Image (tube, rainbow, N blue to C red):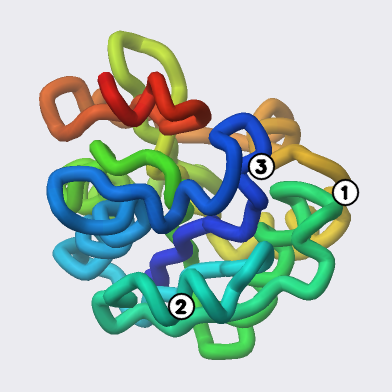
Amino acid sequence: MVAGLVLAAGAGTRFGGRKQLAELDGRPLLEHALAAMAGAPVEPVAVVLGFEAAEIRAGVDMQGAEAIVCPDWIEGQAASLRTGIEALERAGAEAVVVTLGDQPGIAARAIAAVVAARGDGASAVRATYDGVPGHPVLLEQSLFGAVCSLRGDVGARELLSGAVVTDVPCDGLGEPGDVDTPADLER
């Protein structure tokens, strides 16, 4: 089973607050990432929340995703990733596709392309845009233990530098940009 994971636990400090609830095209920013996962060939889907989790859960249509609260969210992205991977591994996931809640342009088609590229001995599959690595990123079960050793405000990038990774060009399958500031949202 290939599961989906959306990371959305941060406080949005550079944004000035709860960017998960910032409106984009008539709905909260986080809903865009959740809708992409809901339309992709992954199940189950989990979203990791942290900062003001109750308010975010109440203000966002979770699109069928299970909301998981990361108690150590303030530590950074590694804590959120660990929390999500551990929960999905317990649910029986053989692989997990990871996206970020502040990337509203990630498309279900890009997630599907990454899932379809599994195999050939790779322990990870990663989308690229114009040759630059981005999300979604699929992590095979063989990397789950290493994910649990990550600390700080880092994602899986460090792990991937020493792993066999299949890169999948996703040009034209969505936009990989993230929303860190209100100006990013305006663009």
Give, as a three-letter code, the residue at label 2. Answer: Arg
Residue 74: give x, y in percent of width and height: 81, 55
Q: Earlier in the sequence, mark 2 or mark 1?
A: 2
Whether residue 28 is visible here, answered yes or no, is yes
User: Which of 65/110 is in front?
Assistant: 65
- The circle on residue 151 is 1
**Measured Cα–Cα span from mark 2 to mark 1:** 25 Å
The circle drawn on residue 88 is none
Q: Quadrant of the C terminus?
A: top left
Looking at marks 1 and 3 on the same chain, the residue that comes earlier in the sequence is marked by 1
Q: Quadrant of residue 31?
A: bottom left
> Which image quarter holds the N terminus?
bottom left
Q: Residue furthest bottom?
A: 91
Amino acid tagged 1: Arg
Amino acid type, residue under disc 3 in the picture: Ala
Q: CA distance from mark 1 to mark 3?
A: 10 Å
Q: Nearest the camera: 138 or 123?
A: 138
Q: Residues within 10 Å of mark 1 (few under 14, many from 20)?
A: some
Q: Is residue 94 visible?
A: no
Q: Which residue is mark 2?
A: 57
